[in-house]
Image: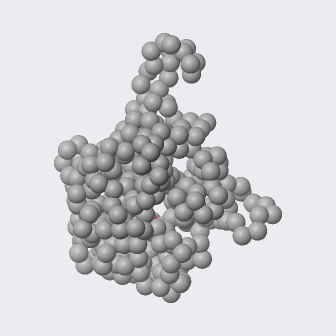
Amino acid sequence: MRKTIIAGNWKMHKTVAEARELAKALMDGIKADLVGVALPDIVLCPTFVCLPEVLTTVKGSALAVGAQNMDHRDSGAFTGEIAPPMLTGLGVTHVIIGHSERRQLFGETNHSVNLKIKAALKHGLIPIVCVGETLSERDENLTDSVIHHQINSGLHEISVEDAAKLVIAYEPVWAIGTGKNCETGEANRVCKLIRRTINELYSKSEDGKEDSAKPKTPSHVADSIPVLYGGSVKPSTIDEQMEQSDIDGALVGGAALKAEEFLPIIKGGAKRLKLSSSRA
Ligand code: PGA
């Protein structure tokens, strides 16, 4: 059975005091409304400066804390960067890698994403790897090839054992922060495509050669990798999204900034968890 994960990407929002209030409000809301309910994995991703405060606030609760980015190197003269051991040293367990805002606004490439995934895995952080097409790529019918390329190059030279530790988030760029939701059936199709692409990447021919004409032994590694959807997820969209075969959770931006919006999304995740436990 795959994990259900609800992650909140707080982006460049919230002071330390505001971050503490939000984390507290979420914990109070969970205690009030979801007592006795099996919870999905919940990951809060505040800014770097808020990580210690949020970690202290959620200590002993079911909430995990993730970073929004990191450098791939362990230390060095890289002004302004944050290294993986600094995150693990705090108790951070997850890290978002390759968010489209990092790719579009800060020059991240599939290669840097690959380096960061490897660094996260080396340090025992769970990477939440974001992939997704832009509007013009979708309009030109390039969605599937963009996804294929982002997955294949992002996972380059990552062992199958390490690949099993990944979380992938399908985030169509045009749906992020725009209020435009990717139609649920289409989001599910792309999440399925991501899973198939990863399985194909790890399928092996009998002689171990990549270009071999011999039949390949299929890999099922991605059958247990959670694939999340992100892009204008709201309380009003989550239930339908969580009913899909291949959407295992959500990466939420705007609606993660208010407890009254994020709590119903967590509830949606809890419903999926219940559904998948009953199917297992
Ligand atoms: P959004 O952001 O929910 O505000 O669209 C999602 C994200 O950027 O991860």
Please give left or right for residue 169 compared with residue 260 in the image: right
Which quadrant is the N terminus positioned in?
top left
Where is residue 24 drawn, in percent x and y? 40, 81
Q: Where is residue 32 in the image (x, y as percent from the top left)?
A: 25, 78
Q: How is the image coloured?
A: one colour
Residue name at image x 36 percent, y 59 percent: 250
* Residue found 60% across the figure and 47% down from its top: 110
For the residue pair 115 and 135, the one nearer the viewer reads as 135
Q: Which residue lies furthest to the bottom in this view?
A: 17
Q: Is residue 154 above or below residue 67?
A: above
Considering depth in this image, is 193 or 30 the residue closer to the camera?
A: 193
Relative to the observer, which residue lies in front, 225 or 148?
148
Count of residue discs: 0
Residue plotted at (33% across, 72% down): 262
Residue in the picture at 50% in, 87% down: 17
Residue furthest to the right in view is 77
Towards the viewer: 52 or 18: 18
User: Residue 259 appears in which quarter of the rendering?
Assistant: bottom left
User: Can you say whether 126 is above or below 214 in the image?
Assistant: below
Quadrant in the picture for the C terminus: top left
Residue 167 place in picture, x, y as percent:
45, 50
Q: In this view, does 44 lie above or below 173?
A: below
Q: Is residue 36 visible?
A: yes
> Where residue 274 sits: x, y (%)?
22, 55
Answer yes or no: is residue 42 visible: no
